[in-house]
Image: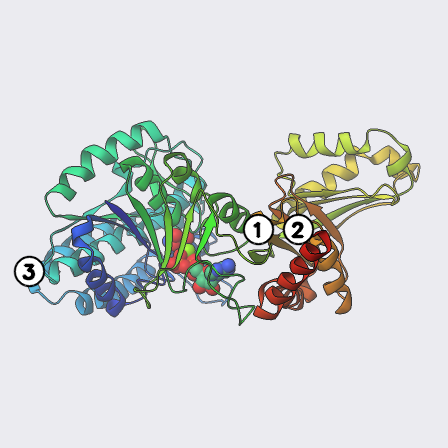
Amino acid sequence: MIVMKFGGTSVGNAERYREVARLLGTYLDQQPIAVVSAMAGTTDWLLNTARALADGGRNPGGTSHNAEKCVADFHTRNFDVIAATIHNPEIRKQVETVVEGQLQLLLRLLTGVELLGELSPRSLDAVAAFGEKISVQLLAGALQDLGFKAQPISAEELILTDRTFQAARPQMEVTTNRCRSRLVPMVEDGIIPVVTGFIGATDDGITTTLGRDGTDFSASIIGASLDADEIWIWKEVDGVMTADPRLVPNARSLRRISYAEAGELTHFGAKVIHPLTVMPAIEKGIPIFIKNTFNPSFPGTRIDHGHEATDGVVKAVTSARNLALITILGGGVLSVPGIAARTFAKMAALNVNVFMISHASSGHDLCLVVEKKVIPQVIPALRKEFERELELKEIDAIEADPQIVTIAVVGAGMRGAPGVAGRLFSALGRKSINIMVIAQGSSELNISLIVSADDEQEALMTIHEEFLSLTGLGKTLSRSMKQASALS
Ligand code: ADP
Ligand code: ASP
Ligand code: MG
């Protein structure tokens, strides 16, 4: 069995649904299970519409909304795609009937949101789930239209989650039992199950979502539950690349990386897969492949326990824009014991995740990197905590800088390899890029640094050129040869 995930971009329109159905059909012998996202743009549309309706129908464009009009537009768009995707009238009618029912439910939900002017995380999940629920109808319909046996399934029936709406976590034991009893008989019957990505449900049947871009994670949860042979994540790129190809045009695709390297890369912002995707697969040792729907014969990237030995020590470089830098500045930061301890206690009390910390022994400041969105909560809380120190001028200021990016340089080969940080600084220094904070993870799988948001692309290109372009790799190779000959 192979679990195959198709993201929103892979199913962006009717032609793409048919293309994905043809592709799945070619793997029938390998017993594929499809896990599919909403059509590109749908989840954003659903969430934005619900928010605009809750907000009295106002939206940034100033046009007025009402639930009925919104759902009518959505109906037209979806029915156009159904008509273009499914040619057989009987199959099309079946899919239309199901989708019609789904849209009526969506209308009732959105009308509630509009009338109450209130939108809880739970309601957002219920609304967002419709994108995937409609998508499985389309893909299963496209498969049937091509003559394959296919069954649309909502993961509400399969993935049991906790009640953390918008970031629900699976309970694997029940999920495993459900996946096995529901999906295995179908697969053995030659049916291709088409399962919704992104969603699950609580033990009392309330819809949850695993968080944005969660379909990769869904595929891994289902793959691990079924003890699948492999998990394939189909994208529009040739696998995991040495950098985001949109920012570094000469990024190359990697043939093999470890679960840990993939975890580091995605944790530090590589948008290629959801950061939790590797977790369910690790325990069972199921390899994950990232493959390109536009280039299916290309092997893509294999993610497993091992890692490809490369000539260089660095595998990839990535950046994240969702973080901000908090600085606690002043002579007292050094002299007053416990400032750091109190800062971290406050962060823990606020349930705020600290991504990086730096406190140079010579400097008078303590820097923390947190998500941008928590700044309005964290800064006043810290100023209150250190009210006395601020009055006594032991602390001069507590400030947040949201105009930063985190750059992470990742590779298992950096473990114990001397000189990587030095080379990194020199390369950035030559381009006059100021490094605001630097940290090395204890795993030594990554070095992360903070630079101004204005320097993001130049920093990525510079690091890529130094370590990952073919000339960069050449430099690394000649250094290690020199080191080797000096030793011998
Ligand atoms: P899907 O809709 O299939 O989930 P996404 O658009 O969410 O696909 O994710 C794939 C995108 O991630 C690619 O198009 C690419 O631009 C981006 N990306 C960022 N970093 C990397 C990387 N290191 N390797 C490959 N792709 C990356
Ligand atoms: N459709 C969801 C989203 O847009 C999940 C996914 O695409 O993985 O976030
Ligand atoms: Mg995605």
The residue to which callout 3 is attached is 90
Q: Is residue 366 above or below residue 317?
A: above
Pinpoint residue 439: horizontal percent, then vertical percent: 70, 46
Q: Label 3: state its secondary structure.
A: helix
Kind of residue at disc 3 = Glu
10 Å crowding of disc 1: few (<14), some (14-19), many (20+) = many
Label 1–label 2 contact, CB within 8 A: no
Kind of residue at disc 1 = Gly
Kind of residue at disc 2 = Ser
The residue to which callout 2 is attached is 448
Name the colour scheme: rainbow
Q: Of 19 and 129, which appears nearest the observer?
A: 19
The residue to which callout 1 is attached is 411
Q: Which mark is residue 437?
A: none
Mark 2 near ligand 1 (CB under 8 Å)?
no
Between the residue at mark 2 and the residue at mark 3, the CA separation in whole angstroms equals 56 Å
Q: Residue at x 60, y 64 (%)?
A: 473
Could you tell which of marks 2 and 3 lies nearer the N-terminus? 3
Q: Quadrant of ligand 3?
A: bottom left
Tell me the quarter of the picture where residue 8 sits.
bottom left
10 Å crowding of disc 2: few (<14), some (14-19), many (20+) = many
Between the residue at mark 3 and the residue at mark 1, the CA separation in whole angstroms equals 53 Å
Q: Residue at x 21, y 65 (%)?
A: 18
Q: Of 91 and 404, which appears nearest the observer?
A: 404
Name the mark nearer the viewer: 1 or 2: 1
